[in-house]
Structures are given as C-alpha cells and as structure tokens.
Image (cartoon, rainbow, N blue to C red):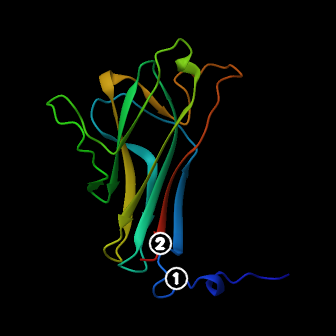
Amino acid sequence: MSQLKVNSIVPVAGAPTGGAGGIIQVKQTLKTDAFDSNQSSFEDITGMSVAITPINSNSKILVTIDLCYGGQQNGYYLFKLFRNSTHIGVSTAVSLSNQLNGTFGAAVGNGDNEFYKLHNACYTILDDAQDTNVHTYKIQVYTYDTRYFYLNRPYNNDNYAYIMGGTSTITAMELSG
C-alpha cells in the first residue's frame, strides 16, 4: 500500500518563507444533536466551540461557522463569535438605544409553513493568532422577543416525513502568515 506524506507537499510548519496561506492544521466540531433557546440575552450554543493551538504566532486563523436551524415564525436571531472571552467580528452598523450589534444574524420568515423548515446561516472570518496559546472559538445566540431558536431541527418536531434534522459545524484552520 502506498502512503502520501503530507509534510512533503507543504511542510507541517506552513508554507516556505514568502509563501503565505498554506494550511498548517484544521480543527472542527460537528454538532449533531439539537439545541434550543428563547432567551432575550446572549447564551452559549452548547457544543458549538472549537479549540486550536497555533504552531506559529504570526499565523492567521480562518474560522467558519455553518448553522442549520429552525425557529418560530417571524424569528430574529443574532449571533456573537468569541475568541476565548473576546467578541470578534463586532458590527458597528447600528447605534440606537434599543438596537444590538453582533457578529452575524439569521431569521425565520412569517409564512404558515415556517414552523416546519430548516434554514442555513454561514459566517467566515480571518483572525490573527497573535500567539501560540490555545484559542477557543464559540458562538452565542440572542433571540428577539423570546422567539424560539432551534439548532439542527425545525420548530415543529411532530412525527411527519417532512420534519428533517441537520448538523452544524464550527471550523478553525491555521494558515501560515
């Protein structure tokens, strides 16, 4: 049986000098179970975090989030992405007293069949590693007007063939600087 040596293609420590952008390592969390929230305050999405320890302090960390979700009709959901305890990718687009800034948002429509549907929300950001300490990336969710948010399933969970479950991921890739 033949073997492929990955560090022969691009060294484990990243691309050679001047060759930025090589993938050094990839870490991913796959969430297959459900999570729900109807909190009008930010709450951790259980199981949606990933830890990565950069090999090089000048590396970049490419973080991607793919959420499969359902919720109540006319649901508005705001998400925050954290590196350890620091909120990253913070919007500054709204500033009135009742408005909220987060990292990205999602919604469920107001139609009659929205209770039964799955939706997808995706987000990607390139973050600076800054050091070689462990970095844990996690997601929090806020639900407007206590409208239920469900991860990996629709709002309605009755025993019908059109009720379907999905999965969500959070991925961190170290890229050479």
- Residue at the image point whose x is 43% and y is 45% from the top: 46
Left or right of 106 on screen, residue 92 = left
The answer to which quarter of the image holds residue 33 is: top right
Quadrant in the picture for the C terminus: bottom left
Q: Secondary structure at mark 2?
A: strand
Q: Quadrant of residue 18?
A: bottom left
- Residue at the location (52% across, 75% down)? 22
Task: List x then y, in percent, for residue 85.
Answer: 27, 57
Q: Earlier in the sequence, mark 1 or mark 2?
A: 1
- Callout 1 crowding tier (Cα within 10 Å): few <14, some 14–19, many ≥20: some
Q: Nearer the viewer, residue 157 or 145?
A: 145
The residue carrying mark 2 is: 175
Task: Relative to 169, say whether 58 is above or below.
Answer: below
Dot 1 amino acid type: Ala
- Judged from this view, the residue extending furthest toward the top is 112
Vertical relation: 173 (above or below) 124: below
Mark 1 vs mark 2, CA separation in Å: 9 Å
Give the residue at x 72% y 22%.
161
Q: Residue at x 47, y 21 (%)?
A: 109
